[in-house]
Amino acid sequence: MLVFLLLLSGGYSTLRSNKIIVLFTVLGMAPFLFHYCVQSMSDDAFPYEVLERSLTIQAVSGSDVFSWGTKTTFLIVDNNSCAESEGCFSWQDKKIQLNDYQEGVYVKGCSYKAKVRLKPPIGLSNPGGFDYEHWLFSKKIWAVGYVKGEVTPLSCNLSVGWFDRLQEKLASQAQGESLRQVRSLGLVKALLFGNKSGIVEQDKDLLSSSGLIHLFVISGLHVGLLFGVLLIFSRLSLLGCQAILGSKLSWFAGVLSEILTVACVWWYVTEIALPVSAVRAAIFISIWRAVRVFSYQTTIWQVLGGSFWLILAMWPEQVVSLGFWMSFLAIVGLILPFWGRGRGNNGTELKSSWLKRFFLTLRRYFWTLLKLQLSVSFILLPVLIWMQGAPVSLAALWNLLLIPLFSVFVVPSLVVACVIFWWSESVALWLFKLLGSLLVGILDCVSDSVQWLNHMNLDLNYYHPSVAVFVFAVCALMPLGLVYRAFGVLAVVFIILLGRDESAHFEVWFLDVGQAQSVVITRDRRAMIYDVGFKFGNFNASDAVVIPFLGHKQVKVVDHVFISHSDSDHSGGLEALLDSRYRPDTLHANYQSDLLSLLGGQVKSCSYGDGLSWQGSRIEVLWPNPQSKLHNELMSNNDTSCVIRLEYGNHSLLLVGDISVKVEKELIAMAKKGDVRLSSDILSMPHHGSKSSSSMAFIQEVSPSWVVASSGALNRYGHPSKVVVERYRNAGVEVLNTAVSGAIRFDLENQDGLSPPLMWRTLKESYWTTNRKIGL
């Protein structure tokens, strides 16, 4: 971060001119600025006294709508939950995110009154997973929750502008059309206005998983592309003015074209409701063009540094936003190809006719635009690979193709269609549909390539290739001599050959999947999974947690998947896992479903007496037992849970699903007879810590050193029960909870003794990590 700040503040020129005072000022201010910005956002803590209460609030609908139910950001304007004498709180100007499971439609800018349940901004914490708490913190969202009952619309103070009219027209055109037409118009709306509500779910999933979502959300990239198109038009118009008016008014015409170009950029940013990412780009463009027009003696790095500090002064919370840093990194990618290089104009172009200059200018700008986009793609490629892993390795190639295509053709065509919309709506809509069909065709090609990559099961090393690409990009783009670039190529080869040290340790990971369960066991880049978490609507634990985790651990093959029982909090992510590159060789399950019937011979039962060896360990199935009296009775679905015991060297693990006290008694009886062995070092807490499980007799028979409760933070069931937790502690068992600790890792490799577990939330604790008062 400090090196980046140095560059932004004109670090190159600073070092060259020995301005030591400026250098130390920048280095000294950076940590204080970061601490101040973050601390100012952390002071306003969530009042935990309201956790169990229903609150009536009045709020204004804000920005985004997500695919899991309907998540909408609101700004609280009044809180009328009860009188102050009853211990209520006065909240105003607080941003909250509410999930309406009834999937109500909320109009941006309208005011609503509703009864809600709130909790602090809590997210899942897993290796390789999306840092939801970080995202909420960067958006200054103070609380999350859900809507209870009916929502009462209050008022809407909306002015219908030209963009609104165009959006309504596109939405009406999509009604009653074929799926392909609906997809095309939804993609056009997203590309023009940043409105993702029209994108069908299959395209949303594809864009998110392939790393191409940034092309379809309004960001600095879109503002930059729009500015580039407008700049080309303005320069071409300027050449025409010079041909007609002569050179006397050339300076005035140039200034006027710059002002109109920047004004059009700000008009567009205002029409799309001033998203911060777009405003950032508009600020930089404004400062940059003002400096050029008035010929100030400043470097481009100083312009970038000025924009950096101005944006942080306006929005301090941006200091923890990954998008903020990536946007400035992209600008660095735009600068590097031309840093220290002349414009290359030898004067011959000025002697040419105005028509020849027109075509030469047009060619030069298009080649420059293409070169800039390739530069940005190379610079951002390592970050995308580091964030999202293998699918982005292929998507990076798509970025190299699509960003220039969007820059040179798609975005300019959309701008032209928008201009035509003023004159002829029918012609403009025809153009929108044509461009939408092109976008759908592109996404179909991307989908085919991603599926090919998933089924190829390629052995990709994510991290060091990303560093290699970054080094290559910098060496290729910087104005250095051939010798220095040769050293850069050697560095790339060294980085690739160095690779990343692979851990051969036998690890057990209890993943943080909320009020659900998923346990992943890894060794030598192979994995075995017990349960795959939840599914709510289009959101599932496999896509959100399990698959990113497998990518983070560089797992090559998933050999076995055990599904304890059919409840959605244990089996919900199975379909997504089967559709991924981690499709297991063998699936163990005891229930029937249409999905399992399609797998045929890949599905095996999970029954007492079954066993297998895996990576030096021995796995035995202890339950269900067909010979048991309880099995012949009508058992609940929870009691059909597949119970397995894993033994690796001197260490052991017992995974029990959602069994109740009834099954615990059966297992104890089997253990007394010597049919099974229950004693284990690590135990998964039965049924997330429900009162219906974890009898003292069972705890004493297993005698674990550690017990792990897989539960959701502040869940409505009260899991794990305080009574159950106290019972374990009285037996001398160390209790852990994924809701508090995030993902929990046990390393079984050390045979001299079980190493203390690693708790991911503690390891990755930061400013934005929610201070949880939900202790065990």
Image: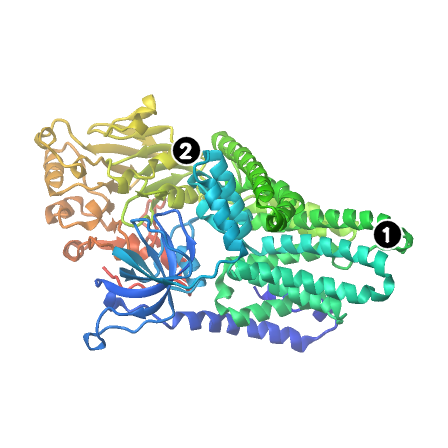
Residue at the image point whose x is 55% and y is 50% from the top? 192
Query: Looking at the image, which is closer to me, 120 or 156?
Result: 156
- Residue 442 lies, in percent from the top left, at 56, 36
Residue at the image point whose x is 47% and y is 40% from the top? 174
Looking at the image, residue 519 sits to the left or right of residue 499; the answer is left
Query: Looking at the image, which is closer to me, 135 or 194?
Result: 194
Query: Looking at the image, which is closer to me, 177 or 709?
Result: 177
Residue 419 makes an appearance in the image: yes
How far separated are the C-alphas under marks 1 and 2? 58 Å
Q: Residues within 10 Å of mark 2 (few under 14, many from 20)?
A: few
Q: Which residue is mark 1?
A: 354
Task: Give the structural element (helix, strand or loop) at label 1.
Answer: helix
Q: Residue 579: which disc?
A: 2
Q: Quadrant of residue 72?
A: bottom left
- Residue 730 lies, in percent from the top left, at 15, 57
**Depicted 736 relative to depicted 546: above or below:** below
Task: Give the structural element (helix, strand or loop) at label 2.
Answer: loop
